[in-house]
Image (spheres, rainbow, N blue to C red):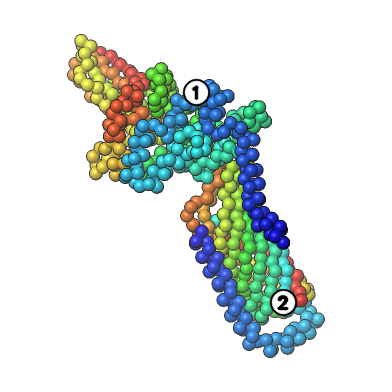
Amino acid sequence: MNRFGFGIRWAPVALIALIAIGGCSQESAALPFGPEAESCGTCHEEEYAAWATSPHATSGTSPVFEALLVEVEGAWGVSARDACIDCHQPSHGGPDGEMGIGCVSCHAATGNTGERDGRLRVDWGLPLIGPTGEGSNGAHEIRTTGFLTSASLCGTCHEVTGPGLLDEPTLTEHRASDFAEADISCATCHMPEGEHRFVGLDPPWGASEEEAQRAANDARELFRDAVTLEVERVGGDAIITVTNIGAGHSVPTGAAFLRDVWVDVSSHGPDGESDGNPRRVLSFGAEMTLNGAPVALITDADEVVSRSLSAGDSRQARVAIPEGATSITATLRLRAVRWDTLDALGLDARHDEVPTIDVDTITIALH
Amino acid sequence: MAMTRMFCLVCLTLLAVTLSFTGAALGQEEPDAPETRVESDESNESGPSAAFDEDLALGVYGTAWAGAYPGVGGGGRLRWEPFDMLGLDLFAESLIVDNPGGGLRHDHSIGFNLYIPIELTPSFRIRPLFGFCAVFSMIEPAQDGAPRADDVLFGIHGGAGVEWSPQRYFSVFLDVQATGYLGHDRSSHGWTGEVSEEYGTFAVVQASLGAQVHFSL
């Protein structure tokens, strides 16, 4: 009786232990080196090196995110802070994994429970997902799913509906664009040739000067493909036109409350000298105000108005040409993070890491 | 979760109360019951109306939903008529339900009807009914490995049915009912299986056409 009693009593424990062992062995069979990006980099060196300087790698550790997180918690509460972490520090790579968006975030993603707000499902117990191929590469099993190359995967985090005044409808914008109709994926522009740098506006925080320069150049080229600048003289005015011709979403998109995209105009006299400081004639970053007055932080604002340029749309400014001017110059510029926002976050020492990029400059003679 | 538990509790309480009341009624009528049965049995032997005099029935039917969730399927039910003016159906049914986002949605209901059989002729009767059900609703994602969007819905329904017995122990029936469901809004498209965190209400109209075999134990 005693013998059986002991056995029955411990049966559930044994069962749970067996299940647990089974679960662990399944995970290790699929991913022998662990889910951390560093482990993946053991074999996938090139991809790892590119990823390590990408906005995905620093999504949870960038100085802007860390500083803004404090502001978000102070203004909107702990649950708002947690909502930010869901996307920026999702811990898909396990408790010892990277603080950002790692390899398994995409390569072990099985789907989402909503195309927004970081509702990603990741299961690195299953064979990893590649863009092509099935079977095994010797180290782990591979399978192919359409999710990896779908806008739905990217949109899981690049469609944000809060907290507070955050509204980042990138996936919605994409779905409304011709790009979605033509089945042009996010990776076509942001991962050219499969590169894992994820070209965008964000600077590679903490990277070498060389890498920072490369990122700035990539952002410039990306923007040049997306947006055109035109200048035309009409009577005594210059018409400045910016058109979103090649982005599958609005420009800027995502955290448009951080971005600064604008056109400066200056004119020159017969001696070639400028008539003064350039004038900002068009702005595309979100406008944040408190009681109608501009503020630098979204957490200080009571209203955020998008000024982003939708896919396919144009916006114009008419500028009176100063008397005696012989030429007029328009420059399309961008900064990943607004100057005043960096200051407001106490990051004035990091200005050098956020370059102002001249995307395009057009000068027209006026005589 | 708490809301779901409370809803179940309310349903079970209502069922228990209803059965208690009918049980009391049975206690009053019981002395007369044997006589009624004898008369019925006699009439059974002379014509097809005998089907409705049996206490029990087993039915199968095809069914369709229209409204929030268009769908088609089938079901089965066990009927018990302990009293002249009250019957109970226990039913289970499965439907394939339209799912605009893609993927296969299949719903499985279990529940009960309480109804009042009103005999218009010996072989034809109508029956107002109402009842409760729980629906285990599943959405198989269109893409392999995508998340599911399963949910449990609770429904309350009311309607009416007609029954015609062309021969002894057999009848055909048509029920039409409106059902209000409490559940979560869901969507599934591509790799997404989303279940809203909020409860919502949904309405469908259901029609069922079937046949049943009547018997007594």
Question: In which quadrant is the C terminus of chain B drawn?
Answer: bottom right
Task: Give, as a three-letter code, the residue at label 1.
Answer: Ala
Q: Badge 2 sits on which subunit?
A: B
In this view, the mark in front (2 or 1) = 1
Residue B57 placed where, x, y %?
72, 71
The residue nearer to you, when weighing B116 against A114, is A114
- Above or below, A126 against A332 in this view is below
Q: Quadrant of residue A4?
A: bottom right
What element does badge 1 sit on?
helix
- Residue occupied by mark 1: A49
Residue B23 placed where, x, y %?
62, 81
Q: Badge 1 sits on which subunit?
A: A
What element does badge 2 sit on?
loop
The residue nearer to you, when weighing B9 against B189, is B9
Residue A357 placed where, x, y %?
35, 22
- Above or below, A327 against A95 in this view is above
Q: Quadrant of residue B56?
A: bottom right
Q: Residue at x 24, y 22 (%)?
A: A278
Q: Are marks 2 and 1 on the same chain?
A: no
- Residue occupied by mark 2: B55
Q: Is residue A252 left or right of residue A29?
A: left
Q: Are marks 2 and 1 in contact (CB under 8 Å)?
A: no
Q: Is residue A358 left or right of residue B88?
A: left
Q: Quadrant of residue A71?
A: top left
Residue A240 placed where, x, y %?
31, 24
Can you see residue A278? yes
Q: Residue at x 31, y 25 (%)?
A: A351
Task: Give, as a three-letter code, the residue at label 2.
Answer: Asp
The residue nearer to you, when weighing B144 against A243, is B144
**Mark 2 neighbour class, 10 Å CA radius: few under 14, some 14 to 19, many 20 or more:** some
Q: Residue at x 76, y 74 (%)?
A: B215
- Above or below, A301 against A103 in this view is below
